Image: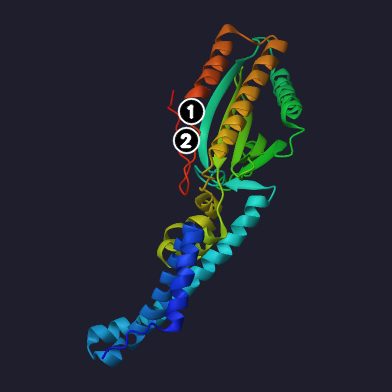
Amino acid sequence: MMNATIPLEYLLIGVTILVLFLWNPRISFALLKVAFFLTLYGIAIPALYRWPDVEATWEAHFLGSLAIPLGIAVLSAIIFAVAAYFIDRDFDQAPQDHFKGNNLFFRYGRKAFEAVIPISLEETATREEAEHLKECFREFLWNSANEQFGPLKEVTLEQQHLIKDLGWSREDSYHYRHGEKEFFKATFQTPRKSTLFYFVYFTLIGRHLMVHHYVYLRGRHFWYHALVFFATAPFHVWFWGYSWVKGRYSILGRLNRYHDSSSYAVVDLKSYFRSACFGMMMATRRFAKVYGLLTEELEKVIWHNVSGLQGIDIGAEPGISMVNRISRR
C-alpha cells in the first residue's frame, strides 16, 4: 500500500509559501522567481556536466563540455549585476551628473513635460548685455523657486546642476563648453517615495533667450525587485552590460518604475507637478514683464503651456511604470 504521508519539511515549505502569499503576494511571487532561477542554475548546470555519463554520444559530450563555461558565465553575470547595482546607487547620489549620446536625463525616469519658451531681447542689446540678462533670469528664477518651495523639506533646489556629455571629445576652449551645460534643478519627493525632477536650461540664440523646461517622474523599487534583478541577470545582462559600462544605461532607471498604488500618491504627484510647472511659467512671465520683454506672443506661449498642463495625465498603477504622455505640439 502506498505511503501518502507528506514529509515534514515539504509541509513547512508549503505553509511558509502560503503565509507569504497571504501576507504579501508581490514579495512571495518575487521570492518564488528568485528560488526558481537559482534552482534552475543549481540543477541544470550540474545535470549538463554529468550528461555524458548517462548518454555516451558526441552531442552529450559537446554539451557537457559547455557546462563549466556556462556556470562561469552565470556566476559572472550575477556578480556583475550586483556590483553594477551598488555602483549605480552611488552614481545616483553623487553631485556630478553625466550622460552619453542621446541619453540626457536617462537616470531620472520618464519624461512628463517639455517646453521651450523663447524670450525676445531688445534689438540694441549687445552680447554682454544678453549674457547679463541670462544671469539675471537665472537668479530671478532661483529666488522665485526659493520663495515658493524653500521652506519645504521634501523639495531640494540646485541653482547650477552641471551635466557633462562624456561622448564629447573636443577639448579646445570654444567647443568644450558644448560638452557640459548647467541646469536649474528642483527635486520633489512625495511621502510615498515617488520623485519629480524639474530642470531649466538657459541659452542665447541670436536675439532670443531660450528657456528649456523639462519634467521627469520616477518611482522607486524594493529589495525584492533587486533580488529578482540579480537572479535573472544571466538572461538580460548581455543586453545592457556594455551600455552601462559606457555610461548609457541606468539600472536604477530600470528598477525605479514602481509607484504606490494609493490614490493619494497620484494626488501628491499632481500637486507637485502643477505647482512646479505653474510656478516656473509665472516666474518667467514676471521676469519678462519686469525687464520690459513681455510681448503679446510671449504671453500666448506661456499661457498655452500653462493651459496644456491640464491635458497631461499624471497617474500611477501598482506594480508597473507610470505612464506619462504629452502630445507633440
Q: Quadrant of residue 283?
A: top right
Crowding at label 1, few (<14), some or many (≥20) Cα neighbours within 10 Å?
some
Q: Position of residue 121 (x, y in %)?
A: 64, 14
Q: Residue furthest front?
A: 1
318 and 142: which is toward the camera: 318
152 w.r.t. 25: above or below: above
253 vs 285, left or right, is left
Which mark, by number, is residue 312? 1
253 w.r.t. 49: above or below: above
113 vs 65, left or right, is right
Q: Who's the residue at 40% across and 76% down the image?
A: 70
Residue kind at label 2, given as amino acid type: Asn
Residue kind at label 1, given as amino acid type: Ile
34 vs 1, left or right, is right
225 w.r.t. 61: above or below: above
Decide: marks 2, 1 in contact (CB < 8 A)?
yes
14 w.r.t. 251: above or below: below
Q: How many marks?
A: 2
Secondary element at image label 2? loop
Q: Quadrant of residue 170?
A: top right
